Image (cartoon, grey):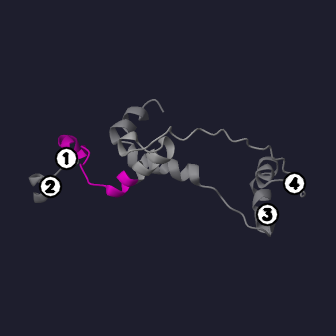
Amino acid sequence: NGEFLDGEVTTGFIAENPSLMAPLNERDRAQKLLHYIGEIIVNGPPKSLGAAGDAPSTVNPIVPEIILERKDRKQSLKAIFDTQGPEAFAKAVRENEGLLVTDTTWRDAHQSLLATRLRTIDMTNIAGPT
């Protein structure tokens, strides 16, 4: 784009040039290969390639019920926080001798979605009601 190369763009550049958001026709061979392998695994080899017989049968595995018995019945950190407050929680964390892991999947996932998939116009449209 000439405007872009000349540095004559404004904050509305992308909105004024919707063709920039059109999908690219790339030759992504790795993605095509993964898609093909997935198709073969799920649906079996295609008849057009000389496959004989039916597609693989679906198997409904029997998942055994596993009952875990905890030998140590100490209170969870979440329960300590809920019942005794943040000071008791912090103390329990400091006194813990084992490894503590914090799962940030949900937090990070939502931040990524907001950062990469939420347009400014969408944010302004929902800002009023919130």
Mark 1: which amino acid?
A: Phe
Q: Nearer the viewer, mark 3 or mark 4?
A: 4
Q: CA distance from mark 3 to mark 4?
A: 23 Å
Which one is earlier in the sequence, the residue at label 3 or at label 2? 2
Residue at 48% x, 33% y is 130
Residue carrying label 2: 4
Could you tell me if the residues under marks 1 and 2 are in contact, i.e. CB atoms within 8 Å? yes
**Mark 2, secondary structure of its residue:** helix
Badge 2 density bin: few <14, some 14–19, many ≥20, Cα 10 Å: few
Within the image, what quadrant is residue 27 found in? Answer: bottom left
Residue with the mark numbered 1 = 13
51 and 29: which is toward the camera: 51
In the image, which is nearer the foreground, mark 1 or mark 4?
Answer: 4
Q: CA distance from mark 3 to mark 2?
A: 56 Å
Query: Which mark is first along the chain, 4 or 1?
Result: 1
Which residue is tagged 3?
A: 91
Q: CA distance from mark 1 to mark 2?
A: 8 Å
Please provide the residue range marked out in magenta: 12-33
Mark found first going from the N terminus, 2 or 4: 2
- Three-letter amino acid code at the position of disc 3: Lys
Q: Amino acid at mark 2?
A: Phe
